[in-house]
Image (cartoon, rainbow, N blue to C red):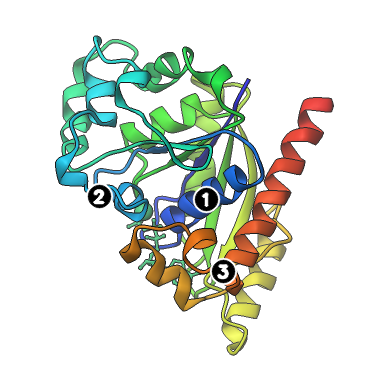
Amino acid sequence: MGRVIAIANQKGGVGKTTTAINLASCIADKNKSVLAIDMDPQGNMTSGFGIDKNELENTTYDLLVDDEFQVEDCIIKNLFKQLSILPANRNLAGAEIELLTEKDMQQILRNKLEDVIDDYDFIIIDCPPALGILTVNAMTAADTVIVPIQCEFFALDGLTQLIYTIGLIQKSLNPDLTIEGVVFTMYDARTNLSLQVVENVKDCLDQNIYKTIIPRNVKLAEAPSHGLPINFYAPKSSGAESYNQLADEVINNSEVSYDG
Ligand SMILES: Nc1ncnc2c1ncn2[C@@H]1O[C@H](COP(=O)(O)OP(=O)(O)OP(=O)(O)O)[C@@H](O)[C@H]1O
Ligand SMILES: [Mg+2]
């Protein structure tokens, strides 16, 4: 059964999508079958994989709001090696409101994923910068959450609320949900600030922290405009190296927790 991982932080611009795209692609590179799900109306993950978000017929929006749609109807298969994509575009913004009247609106994604969960080793979900119904659907479907934290002064802002929300979902919708870990992003070795943030978060946050720290790397910023994950765009870059390491950590974690 596939391990479902939501990449979430309601703070904007912390590296959720960059992490979702490149982690999914680097895991797929290691001979795992991966489904990447775009749950953000901005559709950044979709375009980062080189998909024209305005030309899409079926998206996560259709999957969530229409009973008739199944995951298989919306997937773009094997786009990069064993990586398939469930794309999104701005239509998804409408789902926030349309779902309000749906019964079990928090559990739609989880229910729909049941059919395909055995087809994948990993399902990676990119969440929007909000704790609304889309993120709640992602966390309800997920086994674990990875929280990207940008190495900047306000890094810890909002984390209490995020951890509180995850706690609420554990209590009501998904008792098995855990925070898999936090990953530092956009680390700049030239500044003391990055180092201070890492130290500060380690001291203040009682969570698993990935050994891999994602550096600020211009190739990571450029790759989406070429529609390529980092392991295809610049496989020798520090960005590719770090997301490959993170992929190893995530795969190892999943093996440890399956065994235990
Ligand atoms: N390690 C990195 N090095 C350089 N640039 C990066 C890195 N990580 C992310 N970026 C850039 O920072 C910006 C924000 O990153 P990203 O889109 O991944 O954040 P996000 O959390 O998904 O944002 P949002 O909350 O809007 O969804 C993007 O322009 C991205 O290319
Ligand atoms: Mg994003």
Q: Does any atom of ligand 1 lie closer than 8 Å to the CB of label 2?
A: yes
* Secondary structure state at the residue bearing disc 1: helix
Q: Report whether residue 207 is seen.
A: no
* Secondary structure state at the residue bearing disc 3: helix
- Residue under the image location 25 percent in, 49 percent down: 42
Q: Horizontal placement of 106 versus 251: left or right?
A: left
Q: Horizontal placement of 12 versus 151: left or right?
A: left
Give the residue at mark 3. Answer: 239
- State the quadrant of the C terminus: top right
Disc 3 marks a residue whose amino acid type is Gly
Q: Does any atom of ligand 1 lie closer than 8 Å to the CB of label 1?
A: no
In the displayed structure, 159 sits above or below 113; it is below
Q: In terms of image quarters, where does ligand 1 lie?
A: bottom left
Q: Judge depth for marks 1 and 3 and give the one in front.
A: 3
In the displayed structure, 44 sits above or below 40; it is below
Give the residue at mark 2. Answer: 42
Please state which of residues 97 and 5 is positioned toward the viewer in this rendering.
Answer: 5
Compute the Cα span from label 1 to label 2. Answer: 25 Å
Q: Does any atom of ligand 1 lie closer than 8 Å to the CB of label 3?
A: yes
- Residue under the image location 39 percent in, 43 percent down: 127
* Secondary structure state at the residue bearing disc 2: loop
Residue 160, numbered circle: 1
Q: Badge 3: few (under 14), some or many (20 or more) residues near its Cα, within 10 Å?
A: many
Give the mark, 1 or 3, whose residue is nearer the N terminus: 1
Disc 1 marks a residue whose amino acid type is Thr
In the displayed structure, 80 sits above or below 237; it is above
Q: Badge 2: few (under 14), some or many (20 or more) residues near its Cα, within 10 Å?
A: some
